[in-house]
Amino acid sequence: MDSDTFVYTTYIRTTPDELWQALTDPDLTRRYWGVAFETTWTPGASMVWEEHGRRTADPEQVVLEAKPGRLLSYTWHTFTPDWAEAVRLEQEVYERLTRERRSRVTFVIEPSGDTVKLTVTHGDLEPDGTIKGLIGEGWPALISSLKSLLETGEELPEPAR
């Protein structure tokens, strides 16, 4: 756990364009993630995270890179008291999250025969930080639901909290 980067790779039976759409289209991201993004998907564009009726906007939530069908990178969201309450996060955990530096996530999309290789890299993490622990569980579940949606048309059920 001493690295500042979390990497997760999977293969999805889809096309690069369909995967890009699933990563950026609000109707699709809501299905497997419960989050929709308001942005133009151009480098430097601001991003508003909409999750279950809560909107999180912050000038530091921005698109870093966007190459349709190939690469998408953005800064991770701002942790707010409303978000922490909605996800039932303990106050102590929320306070630790707010002290950590802002991280970033990058999706690399590569054709691989009849599938697409998706590599998710979440970097700029505190090596032993709280965010790293949370995303270590979160990304595999989220990407599994994305994979299921693209391959079967059905996302995985949301885990019970």
Image (cartoon, rainbow, N blue to C red):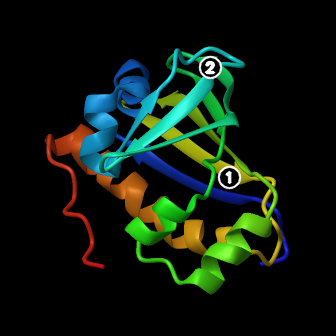
Which residue is more in the foreground, 67 or 52?
52
In the picture shown, does residue 156 fall above or below 146? Answer: below
Q: Earlier in the sequence, mark 2 or mark 1?
A: 2
Could you tell me residue 86's position as x and y percent? 39, 66
Residue 22 in picture, x, y percent from top left: 35, 31
Residue matched to label 2: 66
Cα separation between marks 2 and 1: 16 Å
Q: Quadrant of residue 1?
A: bottom right
**Residue 23: where, in percent of width, then height?**
43, 33
The C terminus - image quarter: bottom left
The correct choice, above or below, for 161 with respect to 5 in the image is below
Q: Residue at x 57, y 72 (%)?
A: 134
Residue 102 in sight: yes
Kindly identify the residue that appears in the image at 48 percent across and 60 percent down.
83
Q: Callout 2 environment at 10 Å: few (<14), some (14 to 19), or many (20+)?
A: some
Q: Amino acid at mark 2?
A: Ala
Label 1 SS? strand
The residue that label 1 is drawn on is 122
Could you tell me residue 124's position as x and y percent?
81, 54
Q: Amino acid at mark 1?
A: His
Using the image, determine if residue 65 lies above or below residue 91.
above
